[in-house]
Amino acid sequence: KRFHIFSFFIFVMLILSRHLFAQKSFTLEIKSVQQSEILNKISYKKSFFSKSERDKEIQNVLFTCYDNAYLTASIDSVVQLPSLLGEGAVAEAVYIKTGEQYKWAALSKGNVDESILRESNSPLLRRGAGGEAGTPFYYKDIRKTQEKILSYCENNGYPFASVKLDSIIISGSSLSASLNLQKNILIKIDSVVNRCTAKISSIYLQSYLGIRNGNLYNEALVKKIGTRIKEL
């Protein structure tokens, strides 16, 4: 019986070994169609066990280009290379055209209140309606500006606010846009109610949490409720 089990184990291992060795391997080399500093600075994975993993890494390289203001970066061509790993290995060179690095022509505040802009303190808007004219269009900076504006709204009665770029105009490699803020419904605290077994007055709880009846909704304070209650 033990012999049969051992034989079956060897048989299974042989099947698995054949399957593993039969799997394809993929290697990747990124090349630039034009002279490009950004591609020389991007580090990327070069060996993969599946085509999907390799394709995902190519996409990550493109995303990095986008984050560095190369908004039109794309795959120009794919060339198969002779593989040093023998049969079953696929080696490819992917040629990427980065295009021009986009720069700000202007970023205007749009319909965003001055008070919100002061609180967000975004470097993109410190020069007023002119924005950071002449500097690269880094989308990560836009995200930071949007996050700061939304954070201010969430802590001042507008937890369902949204903000986006509007009136986008592209001329050559220059881009201009304005901010569009939708505050949506204003939310106020109706009442602070103690539903715990501990006898704590509502007035004390309001003072302790910093959340009082009739106050504007404040996301930062609401998130702290659980921690503050545990500290009582």
Image (spheres, rainbow, N blue to C red):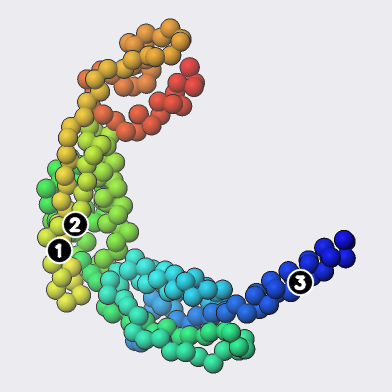
Quarter-wise, where is residue 139 in the image?
bottom left
- Residue behind mark 2: 165
Mark 1 is on which residue type?
Answer: Ile
Q: CA distance from mark 1 to mark 2?
A: 7 Å
- In the structure shown, which secondary structural element does the residue marked by tag 2 occupy? strand
Check disc 1: other Cα within 10 Å, few if <14, some if 14-19, many if 20+. few
Q: CA distance from mark 3 to mark 1?
A: 64 Å
Q: Is residue 174 left or right of residue 210?
A: left
- Residue behind mark 1: 168
Residue sitting at x 34%, y 65%: 67
User: Do the numbered discs 1 and 2 sit on residues whose CB atoms are within 8 Å?
Assistant: yes
Q: Position of residue 18 (x, y in %)?
A: 68, 77
Q: Is residue 137 left or right of residue 5?
A: left
Q: Quadrant of the N terminus?
A: bottom right
Mark 2 is on which residue type?
Answer: Leu
Q: CA distance from mark 3 to mark 2?
A: 62 Å
- Residue behind mark 3: 11
Q: Position of residue 41 (x, y in %)?
A: 44, 74
Which numbered disc flags the more N-terminal residue, 3 or 1?
Answer: 3
- In the structure shown, which secondary structural element does the residue marked by tag 1 occupy? strand
Residue sitting at x 57%, y 79%: 25
Q: Is residue 113 left or right of residue 31?
A: left
- In the structure shown, which secondary structural element does the residue marked by tag 3 occupy? helix
Mark 3 is on which residue type?
Answer: Phe
